[in-house]
Image: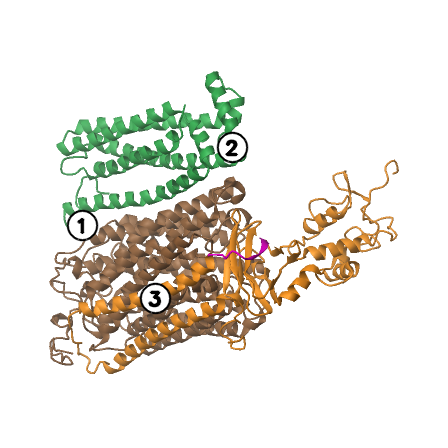
Chain colours: A orange, B green, C brown
Amino acid sequence: MQSQLPIYPEQASNFAPQVDALMLFITAICVFFAAAITAVIVIFFFKFHRKQPNDVGIAFDGDARLEAAWIIVPLILAMAMFGWGAVVYVDYRHTPQDTLDVYVIAKQWMWKAQQPNGVKEINELHVPVGRNVRLVLASEDVIHDFFVPAFRVKMDVVPGHYNTMWFRPTKPGRYHFFCSQYCGTNHALMAGWVTVMEPSDYAAWLSGSSGGNANPVVAGEKLFAEKACITCHVPDGTGRSPSLNGVYGAQVLLADGSTVTADDAYIRESILQPNAKIVARYLPLMPSFQGQLTEEQILALIAYIKSLQSLPVPAKGAGIAPPTGNK
Amino acid sequence: MHRTGDLYGHFQTLEQQKETAALGMWIFLVTEVLFFGGLFLTYTINRHTFSTAFGIGSNTLDIKLGAGNTVVLIMSSLTMAMAVWSAQVGKKKLVSIFLIATLALGTVFLGVKAIEYKQKFDHHLVPGLSFDMKYHPTHPMPGDDLTELALEKEEVDKAFAQDPDINAHGQLYFSLYFGMTGLHALHMIIGAGLLIWLIRGSFRGRFTPQYNTPVEIVGLYWHFVDIVWIYLFPLLYLIDRHR
Amino acid sequence: MNNTPPAPDNELPDTHYLNATYGSGIRSWLLTTDHKRIALLYLASVTVFFFIGGVLATMIRIHLLTPTGALVTPETYNKLFTMHGVAMIFFFLIPSIPAVLGNFLIPLMIGAKDLAFPKVNLLSWYIYILGGSFVLYSFGTGGLDTGWTFYTPLSSVYSNSAVTPAVIGIFINGFSSILTGLNFIVTIHTMRAPGMTWFRLPLFAWAHYATSLVMILGTPVIAITLLLVGLERIFHLGFFNPALGGDPILFQHLFWFYSHPAVYIMILPAMGVVSEIIPTFARKPIFGYAFIAGSSIAIAVIGFLVWAHHMFVTGESTYAALTFSFLSYLVAIPSAIKVFNWTSTLYKGSISWDPPMIYALGFIGLFVIGGLTGLFLACLGLDIHIHDTYFVVAHFHYIMVGGAVMGYVGGLHFWWPKITGRLYPESLSRAAAVVLFIGFNLTFFPQFILGYLGMPRRYHTYPPEFQVLNVLSTAGASILALGYLLPMAYLTWSMRYGKVAGQNPWPATGLEWKTDSPPPTENFHVTPEVTWEPYDFENRPDLGLAAGARPLAPAHGDD
């Protein structure tokens, strides 16, 4: 039972074998009935094909015993399906006591998870194998749904409510998770990976830094080019948007005449809500990168922009406010 | 258009025609029950969740006007029933009189409703239009009883302490208030239109013991609209009433 | 069994409802109160919406050929599936059989001259057109991207698409449904011809009676719910918006309270069509008439009690979930009764392979798969995995397309001779039915697998491992499209060039077949009086069968 067989996902949680068994049970019953009905219809279709144009069929009375039979037998089978399904569901809705709790926040269109010791992840979830894990789900905006096919579990994330779900991973590996309640434009992009690790690896991951030792400035410079920021924020000031040389920490002159300090918060806001503050003499052209950058990536960009502090500021084409008292 | 109660082309007998009209109106009223029912359900659930805000909201409604309106509407159902009876026994003049009385009472009801709505507007209790439950207690209007108003202010302040979002929740109450009474008023206006049509017909002596179906089925409709109000009044005006 | 002598079988009658003396100019169509003409008005309009929904579906399937989406932007894709759902459900599936076939046939089947309220019938069509116009306006001015389910707060707060005109349009359209249902209920109660008792009614009438019960009780609820969504959007109220204290789950309860019974509005009439076709082309009474009639009512009633099975993973209480799962299994039983009874009807029948029979059998095949997969979804433990995946998409398309649409097309083929007076090419139509069946299975069966593998629905892009199944599905869709285009073509052709059908070409036993094809405006020249049981081929010498007919074995013999 592995993912090579392309009709069901890997089984990686305590629920997966139960759900698959239930699936097989119901499939078997349904295939039996579907095949039986089809066979009977096909047989009758050919066997009782009209011979002469004026032939009629033979009427016979209805048979209440037959009707009772095919009410009672399906009812019994239906109750069996209901009962087994109910058992699995009740188990699923009844979170055990000894869980490892992870807080998951959904927002258009990304997932943020916070581990018990405070480590945060974006669109990733690391969990240890063999532990009962409980996810507390909250939404910042619309209804989302956290779905892990390999675990056979999902739960809606409803704004204004907390929902919880639990599972026990049984197999290390990396598994898809998806947003599974339509939530707007990038619903299909709101996916990520659950990484199930051996307990010792998980512990090590928890206490180490996330994401390795990449220099954020280098990462930020790469992103600056990748996300095409450089096409508008040309360093020599000739672009459509202000040069970012020397802007970190300086006073920026805004279109409405006010000034603001270009600190971390300002830069983050400019990336996520670029129309909040427009620099004087520039047009509101910048698209929002909301949902396209992880928190880590934003931090990397800020680090990179900070590193431009000491570069020469072009005379024209920077957003920096002139020192008061001068021109 | 057949105006004299003749058989319509697709019916076999007059009996069938009459039975069909009545059944049609009954089934239409069933759909109306479900229609209002959705609103009633929403109201009930929200009332339970936001009992503070809904209690305050209902206290701002004038119980005298509401009770008065209830009496007016019940009386109009009486005059409507009398109109049907008059048609059935052939008293044609009485038919017109009772229909006019029903229309008059219905108009009184709508007039009082208009007064109540204006009051809400003046007190900034219309959702979406600078809604503020604190407005009236702090801005007395001419004709207000100031001791009453002081009591009201006390209650509103207490409610704010219990439920800081009381304006948001109060807006829900008033949305439902306007939604439910507005839908009801719309049905009454349609009823008034039907009554005018009936009155015109009654002046031409259209309604006889042999043919009074229009009066009967408009009567059914009017009684239904009355019954909806009989549910609305306690739900909106009387809950958590302690003044 | 009185009737004006029928027109000779190779000639159309001189006057009938299509060329009736009050003229065939556009006014006489737009101001008609003849239920048969109104049925044709609906036929034209629902076909337009079917076409729109079909184009949207085509674009969806083409876009999904590649994992990253070949055709449109995410925003547009989301609009495509939303508008596909809205157009198909509210403006095609719900009206189709009742407003086209039901309107045309019910008065004929019960021996009446028209429905109880002919002018209300015309009003229903105009309301449908008005509602449809609002929705088309919404489609044309920015589209709709909330999903046909309008979940809040996405629809009431966050969506930037043309939600308000769309909900207004669906609200208005609801009244079309309500008035049609009202008309059918009253008609069946009060307008039956002498001798047409309740248990002599054709099962098509029973099916529409049950459907009408659902229409009148359920539709007002969604009307008010969508109205509240519109008001919330316009006036920033907070019924369903948690930021203002509202509850998105309340919306879901109100929405599904109608929208689940709505699926029975879509399938019950199709089951009624099949219940007419099977006995006709097996030339014997249906097995278990009372059980089939009763099961339609049972489905309508129990169907109102299962709505929260759409909400098993919203965090609803376990007790609620258990109750709704149990009831959802119960509602499957009456449908099973029908399938077993239809199959039993074939036993010792004299089965012809006429096109309507092929469609009816195709319906049974596809409905069985669709219905059985409902058992998977009703199963709580399974649903936590397959909810909101392509498994659900496959399930409901099997029922709505494989079931309802096939029933609709089959019904059109069965009653086409009565409606138009003409027949259509037989072999081509049998072939079309088979093409439809094959194309349909190819399109939607892979989606069951996709769903179990974990592909969520409403996704404009997907992980690459899901591509093969998606390509298979799209390939099937191209065949399915052919299966719909063929009947559109040859049925249209037949209206002018088809062989004249005569009064009762099949022949069938219903009252509608005892008048001309096409029928006169007043339906019957003389009011019929019914003295026979439904689907009784043996005691109907007027069908030209019993006289000289050789039953397969002695009548009433043992099996």
> Is residue B115 shown to the viewer in this render?
yes
Q: Reply yes or no: does residue A99 show up in magenta.
A: yes
Identity of the residue drawn at 22% across and 28% down: B96
Q: Amino acid at mark 1?
A: Phe
Horizontal side of A30 relative to B154 (left or right) equals: left
Instruction: Provide the secondary structure element on which disc 3 rests.
Output: helix
Q: Where is mark 2, residue-wise?
A: B162
Q: Which residues are magenta?
A: A94-106
> Is residue A157 shown to the viewer in this render?
no
- Which sits earlier in the primary sequence, circle 1 or circle 2? 1
Q: Where is mark 1, residue-wise?
A: B11
Residue B243: quadrant of the picture: top left
Q: Where is mark 3, residue-wise?
A: A80
- Looking at the image, is C205 positioned above or below residue B1? below
Q: Amino acid at mark 3?
A: Ala
Horizontal side of B133 relative to A24 (left or right) equals: right
- Foreground residue among C291 and A115: A115
Chain letter of the residue carrying label 3: A
Near mark 3 (Cα within 10 A), the count class, few <14, some 14-19 or many ≥20, is: some
- Looking at the image, is C316 positioned above or below residue C541? above
Chain letter of the residue carrying label 1: B
Cα separation, mark 2 vs mark 3, equals 50 Å
Q: Position of residue C461 (x, y in %)?
A: 57, 65
Q: Position of residue C555 (x, y in %)?
A: 11, 77
Instruction: Provide the secondary structure element on which disc 2 rests.
Output: helix
The quarter of the rendered structure image containing the C terminus of chain A is top right
Instruction: Provide the secondary structure element on which disc 1 rests.
Output: loop
Q: Position of residue A278 (x, y in %)?
A: 73, 45
